[in-house]
Amino acid sequence: MNPNPVENVLFLADSYKVTHHSQYPQGTTHIYSYFESRGGKFPEVCFFGLQYILKRWLVGPVVTKEMVKEAKDFYRSHFENLDVFNEEGWNHIVDMHGGRLPLRIKAVPEGSVVPVRNVLFTVENTDPVVPWLTNWFETLLVQVWYPLTVCTNSRAQKAIIARYLAETSDSMESLPYKLHDFGYRGSSSVESAAIGGAAHLVNFVGTDTIAGLQLCRKYYSSPMAGFSVPAAEHSTITAWNKSGESAAYLNMLKQFPVGTVSVVSDSYDVFNAVSNIWGDELRQYVLDRANKGRLVIRPDSGDPSQVVLKVLALLAEKFPVEKNRKGYRVLPPYLRIMQGDGVSYETIGKILEAVKKSGWSTDNVVFGTGGALLQKLDRDTQKCAFKCSHVIIDGEALLHVHCRNRNTGDLHNLPCEYEKNPMLFLMPHSLFLSFCSEISESLPYILIVGLDTLF
């Protein structure tokens, strides 16, 4: 038995889509639709995730006679014996196209940063017999809202960190490692974690969400898109009992004598751990390891800004601190803090502002984020929508279909071709490769081309 709940592409639509083929006017031969972010929390979006959806579901022969039969029986039962399923249309796709989908999809390159109220991708049928096919896949394709929104949120946090690094640090080299993905366990499913985790990797290389790395390997030709380090959790500390807290920390240093190691240090009292254990009992062990790697101390509770500042102050009492060229204090390179609790777009700037005002460089702190990165968002965060903007009926083009003005958000009519927008610009990333060449033999089925009319 296949463990996946859905494998048949004829089940990738909302129920009412099954009835839409008979609702279009007689003589309809062409339907052209587009997807956009109509606005929302962020003024621009970082486009990502369509490639996964297309390669996972729509490329190649994806419809068979058996699937059509299965869908016919299912929908007859689902609609209580009404024969509303378009058996003839789907069989046409099998007979005439070998089960490949006669669709043309145009999209901006993944990794592009696009102002809201601009087209991100368009879909149109290439066989006049199946115009209904364009909007059949709205349900599936609109799910790009999730990776797009995670990617946009991650990028917005990167911009905040970059600003504070530029103000308080002598180097920007640490930026790709500054926000670590801890969101695997807080995701709604393994697939959600994979999609969201991959989206974060557009902007950063730090992650513990292995599912995201696997998606990048399989669908984005990236053998290793992210990295992690040995790290403790509360169980590996509390298993030693409170009296053995120091021994638990020492064990971490001995088990991982080189490279970066991260140790959660608030299972009991983080300030005692920093001042008396790391700063006194184990201080020499930390110093002996200085040329071999880095210790990252991780507080995991309390008010993030206050805790980070106090930990910095306590470390400054025990370890040598220098000022960088911009006048901000920096811990020795073998010592850093990770704040992994209460980190989000809304809080990360407040934490870094407090760090800056106290005279510390952003160099001293790295962040971890989980649910706020992969779960605290929805389709309305960026107001994502998929709408028809162009139809051809009896050879006559109807160019002005109900759409929204991209600048004001007001309802208006849009033609099928989008005018140039000089505000668009690209943020290239080596992770994302065009896969047009992989499907060239099956053209015009799922033809993926850039939205060259935009640039």
Image: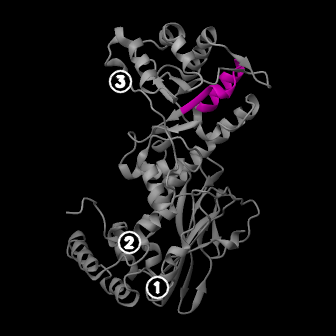
CB contact under 8 Å: marks 3 and 2: no
Region of the chain picked out in magenta, as a range: 348-367
N-terminal-most mark, 3 or 1: 1
* Front position among marks 3 and 2: 3
The residue to which callout 3 is attached is 236
The residue to which callout 1 is attached is 25
Quadrant (top left, top right, bottom left, bottom right) of the N terminus = bottom left
Residue 359 belongs to magenta span: yes
| Residue that protrudes farthest toward the bottom in the picture | 394
> In the rendered view, does 406 fall on the left or right side of 227?
right
The residue to which callout 2 is attached is 17
Does the rendering let one see residue 10?
Answer: yes
Question: Of the residues shown, which amino acid type is indicated by label 1?
Answer: Pro
Q: Is residue 340 above or below residue 211?
A: above
Mark 3 burial class by Cα count in 10 Å: few <14, some 14-19, many 20+ = some
Question: Of the residues shown, which amino acid type is indicated by label 3?
Answer: Thr
Tell me the distance, in whole angstroms, between the alpha carbons under discs 3 and 1. 66 Å
* Front position among marks 1 and 2: 2
